[in-house]
Amino acid sequence: MTEAADLPQVFQHWRWQGPSDTGDLVSFVQPERTGPPPLWRMSLPPQPQAAVDLLEQSERQLALTQAALEQAPSRLERVLQALQAGGQVQFGVTYEAPEHDLMRWLETLEPGSVGFAAESPSQTEVNRAASQFSALMSSLLNQMSHLAWVETQFGGQLLARSIVGWDGDVHTLWKEKASLDDWLWHQHSLRLALASRFALLRMVTLVVQGAGKIGVLMATPGGALLALAAMWQFMNRLMAELQASA
């Protein structure tokens, strides 16, 4: 399965494993578990200001991720235009790191296709990217029973868990005698988790759509997996670029 460490930083709170022991969490409704959930676990430090800082940092990372997702189609189009122009990189046009890297990967799909003199990625790079995306897709397909399970911990103590269905139905289990602060911590975590989940699904959609466009233009036999790996790497580089510039 894909580990959180394999994903862009904004998705670091996702876990592809079972939830924590509920312990003394209580709720009027205990939904049945029909499959392994995509689990968001926000572990807040015990100091309130440090917890606020972590949540605000996560908010900033999410905003940068959403900006990258907005930019991705137009930035991919620059590379596709080079392919449509007979594979010639336009002179005088500055290609930023993610586009540069994608062109390098396309040389692996079809040598000479982009007219871009650059060292092709190693087989290890290609295999790693392909494996990460394949594992992520497998995880997502196996975890479709719920939109998300969201856990919030404060100082190592489990405050609450929400189970969110695709129909928007939400069931939450709370620790006994939960305070208003507990409610606020968990609601903030829940908002972040859902926005992150939709961002991850959109990222996967853009990877598949972009790989399809590349495949149509290049028509390389057996290149579908390489095109997916190239697009996955492109999206990761684009997000890393925005994180670094923030």
Image (cartoon, rainbow, N blue to C red):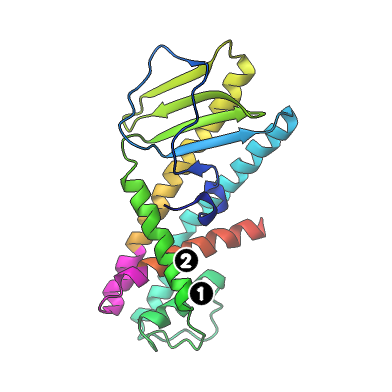
Residue depicted at x 51% and y 61% = 236
Q: Which residue is mark 2?
A: 233
Does residue 221 appear to the left or right of 89 in the view shown? left
How many residues crowd around disc 2 within 10 Å: few (fewer than 14), some, or many (20 or more)?
many
Tell me the residue at 32%/33% (across/down): 166
Is 218 drawn above or below residue 57 in the view shown? Answer: below
Residue 25, compared with residue 110, is above or below; it is: above
The quarter of the image holding the C terminus is: bottom right
- Whether pointer 1 and pointer 2 mark residues with C-beta atoms closer than 8 Å, the reply is yes
Residue 201 rendering spot, x and y as whole percentages: 39, 48
* Residue 74 shows in the view: no
Q: Which label's residue is closer to the chain start, 1 or 2?
A: 1
Q: Which mark is residue 27?
A: none
Q: Position of residue 184 (x, y in %)?
A: 59, 22
* Residue bounds of the magenta highlight: 210-227
Residue under label 1: 101
Inspect the image, locate mark 1, and give the three-letter code of the amino acid beneath it: Asp
Q: Residue at x 48, y 39 (%)?
A: 195
In this rendering, would 198 be left or right of 222? right
Q: Is residue 133 visible?
A: yes
Residue 126 magenta: no
Where 52 sits versus 217, above or below?
A: above
Query: Helix or strand or loop: what does disc 1 sit on?
Result: helix
Q: Determine the main secondary structure of the stretch shown in magenta.
A: helix
Q: Quadrant of residue 51?
A: top right
Q: Which quadrant of the figure has residue 105? A: bottom left
Residue 167 vs residue 108: left or right? left
Q: In terms of image quadrants, where is residue 80?
A: bottom left
